[in-house]
Image: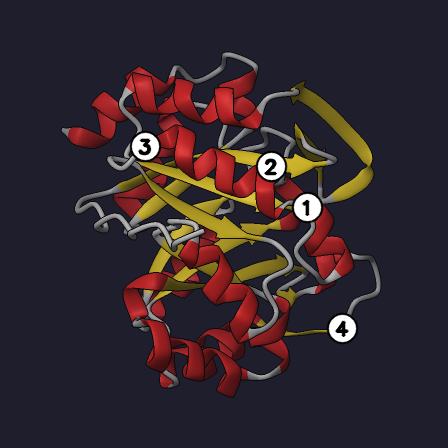
Amino acid sequence: MLPRPQPAIPTGFQLLPAIDLRGGRVVRLAEGDFARETIYGTDPAEVASGFAAVGARWIHVVDLDGAKDGARRQTEAVARIVAAAGSGVACEVAGGLRSEEAMAAALSVGAARAVVGTAALRDPAFAERLVTRFGSERIAVALDVRDGLAVGHGWVPGAAGVSVEAALARLADGGVRTFIVTAIERDGLLAGPNLELLGRLIDMDRGHIVASAGISSLGDVAAVRALGCVGVVIGRALYEGRIDLADALRLTAE
C-alpha cells in the first residue's frame, strides 16, 4: 500500500477531539488507570467521520494498548480513522511510538503529526533525530505529568520521571516545538485543566503548549486559550455531552 499524503497543518488554535483506542473500541480512562475504563463506542472510524462532519480540523488519536505495551497495537484502526476523517482533517497519532520506524509508519498512513512520549523522555537525542528527519511540524512530545514529573510507560504507577521543566527545556534544545501536556491526576475526571502547570510551561517560552486533561466546559477551553496554549485536547466532555463540538469550534474560531 502506498503511503498516504500528509495533510497540511491547519493554522490557528488547535481544538483536538480525542479518540482513545483500546481493543478496537473508543474508551476513556480515569487518571490513566486501565482498570477504570469507560467505553464510548465500538467504531472509531465512525466517530472520526462524525467529528469531521461537524467541522473538526484536528483529531487526537491514542493507541492505549500501544502506550501500555510499548509497541503499536492498533495500526489498522488508526489507519481507518485517518481515512474516515478525510483529507481536510489533520490527525495527531500517539501511543507506543518508540522508534523511528514506528513514527514513520504513523505518518505514512496520513497522520499530520506523530507524538512520542516515553522514548523522548528516556533519550532526548532520539526526539532531536525525529525532528531532523520529519520536521518540527510533524513531531510532538507528550509531557504526561504526575507530581511535577514527566513520566512515560503508559503512566504505570511507580514509573520513573524527570522534572517537567527540565524535560521540556532539554527537548526544546533539540528542536521540539510542540508539547502535549497532560496533568495525569485530572485526566478523564472533568475536574478542569491544571492552569498552574500549563502557565509555568508557557512562561518558559520554549515551545507551543497543547493542553490536555480535565477539560469539562467551554469556559475551560477559553481559559487555556487565554493562558497562551496553542491548542486543547477534549475527550470525555464531548462524549458525555458537556461540550458541544460545534460550539467549541465556533468559540475557538472567534
Q: Tag on residue 86?
A: 3
Q: Residue at x 46, y 74 (%)?
A: 168
21 in relation to 102, above or below: above
Instruction: Give the percent coordinates (x, y) of residue 180.
Output: 46, 55
Give, as a three-letter code, the residue at label 4.
Ala
SS at mark 1 in the image: helix
Quadrant of the image occupied by residue 96? bottom right
Work out whether residue 109 or residue 62 is closer to the camera in this orientation and state it: 109
Q: In the rendered image, is residue 213 in sight? A: no
Work out whether residue 172 or residue 97 is closer to the camera in this orientation and state it: 97
User: Pointer 3: residues within 10 angstroms few (<14), some, or many (20+)?
Assistant: some
Give, as a three-letter code, the residue at label 1.
Leu
Report the mark closest to the observer, 1 or 3: 3
Q: Tag on residue 221?
A: none
Work out whether residue 123 or residue 185 is closer to the camera in this orientation and state it: 123
Q: Quadrant of the C terminus?
A: top left
Q: Tag on residue 160?
A: 4
Viewed as shown, does residue 253 lie left or right of 182?
Answer: left
Q: Earlier in the sequence, mark 1 or mark 3?
A: 1
Give, as a three-letter code, the residue at label 2.
Asp
The residue beneath circle 1 is 64
Give the CA distance from mark 1 to mark 4.
19 Å
Quadrant of the image occupied by residue 155? bottom right
Give the CA distance from mark 4 to mark 2.
24 Å
Report the mark closest to the observer, 3 or 4: 3
SS at mark 4 in the image: loop
- State yes or no: discs 1 and 4 in contact (Cβ < 8 Å): no
